[in-house]
Image (cartoon, rainbow, N blue to C red):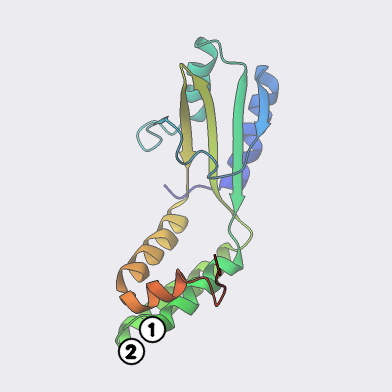
Amino acid sequence: MDLNLDTLKNEILEYLGSSGFAIFHGTPGGLEGLPMVLWDSERHPDYQMFLEVAQKAGVKLILFASREFEAAEIDDLAEQLDSCELSREEYRDYESRLRSLRACEGVTCTLELAFDYNARLHVYEVQPDWFEEFLNIEEELMARMTDDDIEEDDSLGGYFSKN
């Protein structure tokens, strides 16, 4: 779904403030590795439904996180293009796709709401279609990188231990 998350972010914060929830401003992506249950935001995109569940469960604290899309993310992928074995046509296609994403710099690319209930985080997350496109490009380029390129990226950059 192609959402304007900047508008939605303000709407959610206003709703949380008027609903009596305490808001914990977390770091986006900070929930990874924790036991969680994801809300089906594709079929049930209404964040108010998610927050009603939290209220009925007696939750008082909601974690809120958002992230803006940065130019450096596009720049990093553009650099990876040079490391991939691509035909001229494929290279131009990726370049064009990345160039079109420049219009989204500074725009909110992900929103997360979460609450803890019975030792599980219940999470509502939304991302616009253009950010999904960015993630797809990133995944495609990672799959096209040679093993040598991946090993170089994982190196310690010349640092070593004498232990």
Instruction: Give the x, y percent position of residue 150.
Output: 38, 72
SS under mark 2: helix
Image-quadrant location for residue 86: bottom left
- Residue 98 sits above or below residue 51 on the image: below
Disc 1, SS = helix
Residue 90 drawn at (x, y percent): 32, 81
In this view, which residue lies farthest toward the bottom?
Answer: 88
Residue 91 visible at all: yes
Query: The disc labelled 2 sits on which kind of residue?
Result: Arg
Of 114 and 34, the residue lying toward us: 34
Q: Is label 2 in contact with label 1 (beta carbons under 8 Å)?
A: yes
Instruction: Find residue 92 and name its label.
Output: 1
User: Residue 143 or 150: which is nearer the viewer?
Assistant: 150
Q: Picture quarter containing residue 161? A: bottom right
The image position of residue 130, as x and y in percent, is: 45, 58
Q: Which residue is mark 2?
A: 88
